[in-house]
Image: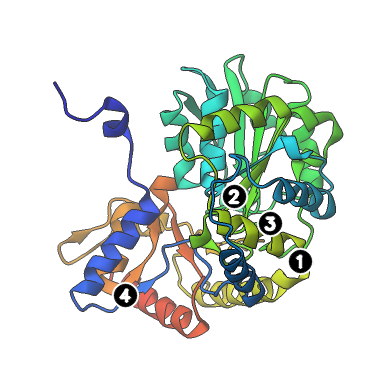
Amino acid sequence: MALLSKRIEALEESATLAMARKSRALQDQGKKIINLSLGEPDFNTPNFIKKAAKKAIDDNFSKYTPVPGYKDLLEIISMKFKRDNKLVYHPNEIVCSTGAKQSIAQTLMVLLNDGDEVILPAPYWVSYAQMVQLSGGKCRFVNTKIDNNFKIKPEDLESIITKKSKVFLFSSPCNPTGSVYSKKELMALGEVFQKHKHLIIISDEIYEHINFTKNHFSIGRIHELKNQVVTVNGLSKGYAMTGWRFGYLGAPKKIAQACIKMQGQITSATCSITQRAAITALLKDPICTHKMRKTFQERRDLMITLLSKIKDLDINKPEGAFYIFPDVSKYIGKKFQETHINSSDDLSMFLLEDAGVSTVSGTAFGANNHIRISYAASNQELMRACRLINKSLDKLH
């Protein structure tokens, strides 16, 4: 009898975490590595949020909380949805969890039966496909192109929907591409969704506050789709709170209550101290996130300037998040000494070992000819990284 389940044997390791692990291993050996693989802001959590957490500790908020979160927190998230996104979610339609990742995973688990199809525009975030697999679902991929800024078109969506389609899962701003769907583009997709009422849309909006268009539009605002949309968000990216583990979702009541039931058997509520800090963060005017957004936009512009000088690297201009997702297909098939580049996996590993720069292969994102480069690092590190990348790529022939 096999020791481990088929479920876990079939599950792939997170590519971003795997690359971070390999980078740390090289650093432990004394090699200098510039880590551009992880999706984590290089900023500290704002002081006003840290003070709220310290006060919560002093005020003894140390007991179990209701599974979906404190009542006043749910009310504030309801207010936030209305204030920032023009969305109406009542407190009993909101569930707080240990990160947006958990919110997405348990939404899939409560929706999918074996064989149900989940439509994923590719490139997609690394964990989406594995979450679908764990939930018993089947992925249907819609490939997008760099010359269309990696966005799905209405006709592409219409052509892939079947009677087995249960969920459409996407992010905007997008990880890994940085693409942002405009109101007009989402309205066009919305017309297709309205014809398929059996389809649930999971909208991952964790990068909401790192949106360089400054016009974040939630697909749940489309009135006709209200009962089809689950909106997922959190504090990790916009408030530099990755380690605090706080995400939340707004959903039709039946789905939200199912997520509470699921969460109650897995993790129960997220950290009580984090919840009190989240109240302070969400009550604050979102203008407090603009300084970090401005910095990321400046870094994006710097990276575009630097990477555009690398002759066989094709890039577009991402409108949000903090990633560049270049097409590296012109380097596939080349080699340096005994190192052969047969895939973006090979190229990403070559850059790690030769340039000392960690990136993530596009394979894990459903885009084999790309790599993801995070610019959540200082200007000095980014400039040095681009020089090293250019130098290493120039060795390939």
Q: Is residue 362 above or below residue 3?
A: below
Q: CA distance from mark 4 to mark 1?
A: 37 Å
Amino acid carrying mark 2 in the image: Gly
Q: Is residue 291 above or below residue 335?
A: below
- Tag 3's secondary structure? loop
Between disc 4 and disc 1, the foreground one is 1
Image coordinates of residue 223 in percent, x first then y, are 86, 34
For mark 3, what is the residue?
A: 208
Q: Quadrant of the C terminus?
A: bottom left
**Which label sits on residue 247?**
2
Look at the image and name its color scheme.
Answer: rainbow
Amino acid carrying mark 3 in the image: Glu
Amino acid carrying mark 1 in the image: Lys
Q: CA distance from mark 1 to mark 3?
A: 15 Å
Taking the image as shown, residue 31 lies to the left or right of residue 293, namely left
Amino acid carrying mark 4 in the image: Ile
Disc on the earlier residue, 3 or 2: 3
Disc on the earlier residue, 2 or 4: 4
For mark 4, what is the residue?
A: 33
Viewer-proximal residue among 153 and 8:
8
- Tag 4's secondary structure? loop
Viewer-proximal residue among 211 and 113:
113
Residue at 52%, 60% in the rendered image: 244
Between disc 4 and disc 3, the foreground one is 3
Q: CA distance from mark 3 to mark 2?
A: 13 Å
For mark 1, what is the residue?
A: 284
Disc on the earlier residue, 4 or 1: 4
